[in-house]
């Protein structure tokens, strides 16, 4: 029996053992979540306790219900004999012989056993209580914006895809940013730890906005090798790693004799003495023993839970997902998690750790034929450290020092030595006719501007909130964002000056095979991070139309009058019981046609290519300069962008004007996206 039992409720007299109403395993993987959003707040505790009074253990995933025999067969993970590279004798501290075919199924969302040729589900107890809540969740999710995936069906929760995974991650980070903004506006006591990441994760997990809830061995649908995450809870909401704190995720598989744990994924984040020098080999240290806890006495690690699961997976030869924790090149206090693909455990042993206690070691080898992930990070770090040179490097800094962060120029495709000549300048250039004429002034703050300050005119223009989080991440798309400008007396480190700080990531202009020159970053980019401004000469629409007859300049023009695909990026107010009417629209409010030409001069933004599924979006920003209002176009990351990923945005479609067709301006699109419209411009 699980938990405490009231023996007075047991039936008296003889029991008819032929009637089994419910069968429930001793160790249940069901999450113990609040029954309503008004339940107790999320508490970050170790996965196996101890837990504060009034709280239950937290496991993010609910086992699937009513899993049929057919569905298990359709999605089973078939164990195979390990390849030759794994056929060598294996050293193991405990490795009894196990029949690989005994009751092992790769998609074990529930414990499944065999008896007399029948398959029965051991985790259906409690399903009635969850059915009512499940329908409520579907109704709630279906009411979200049409620009997100409309609703998350039970199948999409169990079996995601790329679109669903992307939608869940965007919705999570949008909520996290809003919660961070709300916390920044509060006056909290000193020493209080704010964890908007955990609060947002708890809300999404409770309301069912998640995917891949069925635990499985091997790849997770919709998650690609090289994907990056800035919070551990992101791994939970997409089903990549269900433990919010523990480094080993596992589940039990039912054999003929007993249930045994099977390792599904590990997170190597540097908490132990993990050896990660080789990009294809990871020596992983087991969990437990308090080896990394200064407040507790160290002890020998035990062969239980995750450690036992890794040992059993060594004998089974099943695939294990590996997520590596890396230091963020932009913010040294931040850790980035990169999904490095599938590994197999080759051997295990015991050794003395730095604490003098015994620790388990597991050697994992990356399966061949997978795209690079961790290897890309290692290569970039070697470039930064000067340990190896960048192949195809033409210029180490094409800005000639105009930017505080250099922008390299690279061509490892052909012999072209660079793009056509242009003048690099980091600030947009206005003509007299393009300036806003109305007088304006900045704030009167003498220190950093504070959200909620009724005397700060810049904050009041932004509805009392700072549009950015404390670490400079954009919270929401707005019709217009008002920053403090050079005319404002507040300090230069005021966090309401994000788009004026210049480049914050190490960018690279590189040659593509079929799209000319393009832009990407050496550093990982968090969703909402400012990337660059579109810089060039602001021109009027008449001059733009005259230049348009030349045909070439379309590649180097940004035009706010074009038609852009709408998309949902902001958080859903209903998730935190906010009134929709208090939230501004995501439609932009440009006071006049704003056109920038970077044909003859500009910055790195001129090299960003079009995509029908972009990872960058533009946001209008205003601030005061020389007592005049300046309008700027700032680019922000739409989602987390891994290193060396091309940066793209939507070029939009030119409008038909005065009955004249603009079809001659449309160009063939080569973005390769599943949503590609075939043309742009």
Image (tube, grey):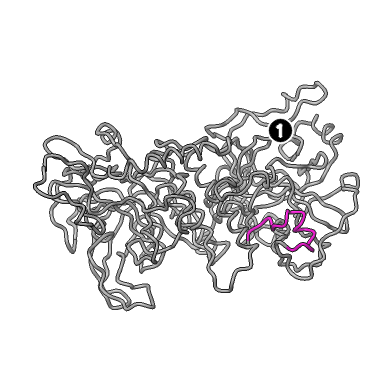
- Which secondary structure dominates the residues rendered in magenta? loop
Q: Is residue 638 visible?
A: yes
> Residue drawn 69% across and 28% down?
666
Front position in the image: 520 or 613: 613
Q: Residues within 10 Å of mark 1 (few under 14, many from 20)?
A: some
Is 454 one of the magenta-colored residues?
yes
- The residue indicated by pointer 1 is 563
Spot occupied by residue 74 in the image (x, y as percentages of width and height): 29, 33
Front position in the image: 63 or 297: 63
Quarter that holds the N terminus: bottom left
Seen in the image, is 633 located left or right of residue 417?
A: right
Residue positioned most to the left: 14
Is 455 one of the magenta-colored residues?
yes
Spot occupied by residue 377 in the image (x, y as percentages of width and height): 48, 56
| Quarter-of-image position of residue 350 | bottom left
Whether residue 302 is situated above or below residue 623 in the rendered picture: below
Seen in the image, is 115 located left or right of residue 457?
A: left
Front position in the image: 157 or 607: 157
Spot occupied by residue 25 in the image (x, y as percentages of width and height): 22, 50
Quarter that holds the C terminus: top right
- Span shown in magenta: 453-469
Whether residue 539 is situated above or below residue 344 in the rendered picture: above
Whether residue 354 is situated above or below residue 181 in the rendered picture: below
Front position in the image: 94 or 470: 470
Q: Is residue 226 visible?
A: no
């Amino acid at each position: 029996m699980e938990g405490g039992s009231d023996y007075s409720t047991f039936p008296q007299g003889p029991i008819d053992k032929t009637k089994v109403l419910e069968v429930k395993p001793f160790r249940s993987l069901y999450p113990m979540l609040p029954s309503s959003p008004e339940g107790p707040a999320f508490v970050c505790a170790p996965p196996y306790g101890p837990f504060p009074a009034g709280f239950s253990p937290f496991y993010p995933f609910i086992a699937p219900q009513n899993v049929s025999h057919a569905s298990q067969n359709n999605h089973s993970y078939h164990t195979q004999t390990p390849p030759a590279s794994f056929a060598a004798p294996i050293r193991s501290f405990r490795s009894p012989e196990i029949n690989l075919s005994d009751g092992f199924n790769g998609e074990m969302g529930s414990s499944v056993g065999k008896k007399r040729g029948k398959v029965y589900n051991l985790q259906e107890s409690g399903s009635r209580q969850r059915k009512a809540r499940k329908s409520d969740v579907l109704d709630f999710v279906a009411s979200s914006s049409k620009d997100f995936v409309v609703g998350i069906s039970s199948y999409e929760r169990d079996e995601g895809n790329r679109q669903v995974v992307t939608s869940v991650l965007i919705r999570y980070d949008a909520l996290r940013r809003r919660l961070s903004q709300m916390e920044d506006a509060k006056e909290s006591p000193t020493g209080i730890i704010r964890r908007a990441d955990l609060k947002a994760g708890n809300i999404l997990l409770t309301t069912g906005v998640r995917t891949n809830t069925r635990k499985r061995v091997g790849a997770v649908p919709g998650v690609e090798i090289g994907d990056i995450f800035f919070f551990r809870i992101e791994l939970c909401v997409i089903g990549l790693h269900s433990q919010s704190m523990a480094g080993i995720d596992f589940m039990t598989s039912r054999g003929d004799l007993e249930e045994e744990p099977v390792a599904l994924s590990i997170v190597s984040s540097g908490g132990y003495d993990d050896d990660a020098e080789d990009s294809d080999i990871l020596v992983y240290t087991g969990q437990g023993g308090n080896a990394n806890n200064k407040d507790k006495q160290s002890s020998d690690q035990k062969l239980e839970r995750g450690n036992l699961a890794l040992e059993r997976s060594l004998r089974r030869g099943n695939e294990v997902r590996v997520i590596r924790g890396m230091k963020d090149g932009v913010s040294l206090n931040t850790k980035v998690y990169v999904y490095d693909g599938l590994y197999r455990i080759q051997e295990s042993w015991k050794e003395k750790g730095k604490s003098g206690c015994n620790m388990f070691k597991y050697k994992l080898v990356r399966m061949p034929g997978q795209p690079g992930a961790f290897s890309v990070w290692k290569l970039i770090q070697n470039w930064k450290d000067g340990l190896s040179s960048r192949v195809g490097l033409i210029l180490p800094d094409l800005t000639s020092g105009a930017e505080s962060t250099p922008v390299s120029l690279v061509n490892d495709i052909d012999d072209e030595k660079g793009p056509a000549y242009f003048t690099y300048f980091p600030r947009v250039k206005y003509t007299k006719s393009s300036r806003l004429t109305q007088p304006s002034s900045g704030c009167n703050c003498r220190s950093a501007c504070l959200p909620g300050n009724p005397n700060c005119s810049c904050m009041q223009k932004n509805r009392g909130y700072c549009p950015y989080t404390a670490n400079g991440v954009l919270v929401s798309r707005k019709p217009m964002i008002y920053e403090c400008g050079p005319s404002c007396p507040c300090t230069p480190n005021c966090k309401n000056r994000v788009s004026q700080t210049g480049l914050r990531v190490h960018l690279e202009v590189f040659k593509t095979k079929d799209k000319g020159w393009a832009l990407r970053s050496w550093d990982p980019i968090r969703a909402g991070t400012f990337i660059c401004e579109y810089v060039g000469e602001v021109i009027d629409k008449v001059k733009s139309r005259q230049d348009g007859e030349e045909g070439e300049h379309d590649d180097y023009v940004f035009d706010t009058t074009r038609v852009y695909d709408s998309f949902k990026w902001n958080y859903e107010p209903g998730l935190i019981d906010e009134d929709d009417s208090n939230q501004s629209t995501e439609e932009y409010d440009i006071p006049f046609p704003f056109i920038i030409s970077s044909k003859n001069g500009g910055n790195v933004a001129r090299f960003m290519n079009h995509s029908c599924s972009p990872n960058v979006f533009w946001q209008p920003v205003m601030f005061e300069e020389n007592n005049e209002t300046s309008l700027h176009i700032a680019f922000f990351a739409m989602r987390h962008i891994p290193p060396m990923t091309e940066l793209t945005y939507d070029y939009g479609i030119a409008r038909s004007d005065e009955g004249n067709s603009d079809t001659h301006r449309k160009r063939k699109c080569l973005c390769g996206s599943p949503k590609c419209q075939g043309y742009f411009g």
